[in-house]
Image (cartoon, rainbow, N blue to C red):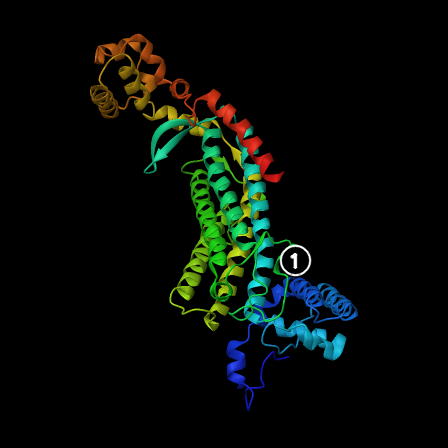
Amino acid sequence: MKLWGGRFETGPSEIFERFSNSLHFDKRLIGADVEGSQAFARSLHRAGVLTAEECTQIVDAFDSILRDAEADPNFFDGATDEDVHSFVIGKLGARVGALAGKIHTGRSRNEQVSLDTRLWLRGECDKSRGWLVALMSALLDLAGKYPNAVIPGYTHLRRAQPVLWPHYILALFEMFARDFDRFGEARRRVNVMPLGSGALAGSGFPHDREAIARDLGFDSITLNSMDVSADRDWALDYVYAATVAMIHLSRLSEDWILYSSEEFGWMELGDGVTSGSSLMPQKKNPDSLELIRGKSGRVVGSLNSLLVTMKGLPMTYNRDMQEDKEPLFDAADQVNGCLEMAAAVAESVVLREQVPFDAAEASWVVATDLAEALARNGTAFHSAHQIVGRLVLESVRNGKRPADWNAEALAAFAPEFTPDVARLLDPREGMKTREILGGTGPATVAKALLTARERLAAMTA
């Protein structure tokens, strides 16, 4: 069913219809379209356009359309409508006849598209936040399994300083907690009711827009009808949040692909999230993490696509904006699927605690601890840095590890090394000096884990 046509002597060409139709991808908005149209019918009744009986008839017919759509996987088969909105109106006409023509009184597809997409996207924000909670919960469980494990922390992918395994996991938690906040902010921006704006100048009928907003659970209403017709900032907000979350997932994936490799050997990924090789029998590949890392590019591409689509459009609505749907839909599908997958991976991880500890113990990750000890004992830090740097150089030249030194040998190397400094050759000891808030000190990390649990509980309250 076409929602326009009187101005035209002939219909659109087959090529144009095929080129411009969007039903094949916007059909996922049918639930939102029905919900929004029902609220509009009730508003038309309040405005005196529909009688109570007509309103009830239309609302009930919409209910039956949605039930049929949910029950029949082939509901859209054979449809030739240009979009989901005209499809739904056609189905309404089949149920209520000419009365269906009243539902579009004073309503433009411009505002209808904005409304439907906002209703749908509001749910996607909630889904994304739900999957983030599941992932963060799995990460905290993983941290709690190995509370005392020591691993090397890296900069430039070079061993830098020793940290506790839970401290590393809490760094991932903080990234995803920010994502949770970002999706919450995106939801706040999405949850603004545009109906009543018309095509661009506002409706010519006396709709109570605040009542429509309450009916549909929106926090507020839009304040300018031209802005509604032109605006896709709220879609960009969601895709940006999805992009940052995917970047975080990609970085987690990169770490765990490395840490589960034979070269690192820190962790084992479960059979349920890995795959084998069609040729090489020994392989256990981290395909789940590689796919997450790969899919991050799709979501970054979706953001770029939507940004470029919107960047040069004159006010207000332009058909270019139909191109917002596919990148938005794909970004939501990918980020939610990847968050779900990442949670499953985290639940499967087994840490081989001794391997990363041996890596820390064999390297000079304690060098900073030694230099800071000299500084606490009165040596200027620049001089302390130089002394420890020479100690490392001497050790590297002679193949000596920190454990090969003792208090006497250190004192012989440099008198600034007092006997108490020798204990810091053990990477577990230096961490005890880092009980500053946010640091990797054992007591601080234990408290941070408890706080993270409390924060996570508040996210679901």
Q: Could you tell me residue 31's position as x and y percent?
A: 66, 62
Q: Is residue 60 left or right of residue 211?
A: right
- Residues 75 and 310: in front is 310
Q: For the residue marked with disc 1, what is the amino acid?
A: Ala
- Quick check: 425 above or below 36? above
Quadrant location of the C terminus in the rendered image: top right
Q: Quadrant of residue 359?
A: top left
Q: Could you tell me residue 432's position as x and y percent?
A: 41, 18
Q: Is residue 404 left or right of residue 343?
A: left
Q: Which residue is mark 1?
A: 211
Q: Quadrant of residue 375?
A: top left
Element under disc 1: helix
Q: Residues within 10 Å of mark 1 (few under 14, many from 20)?
A: some
Q: Is residue 162 left or right of residue 127?
A: left
* Residue 274 visible in image: no
Q: Could you tell me residue 189's position as x and y percent?
A: 52, 53
Q: Could you tell me residue 259's position as x and y percent?
A: 44, 38
Q: How many marks?
A: 1
Quadrant location of the N terminus in the rendered image: bottom right
- Residues 381 and 313: in front is 313
- Residues 457 and 388: in front is 457
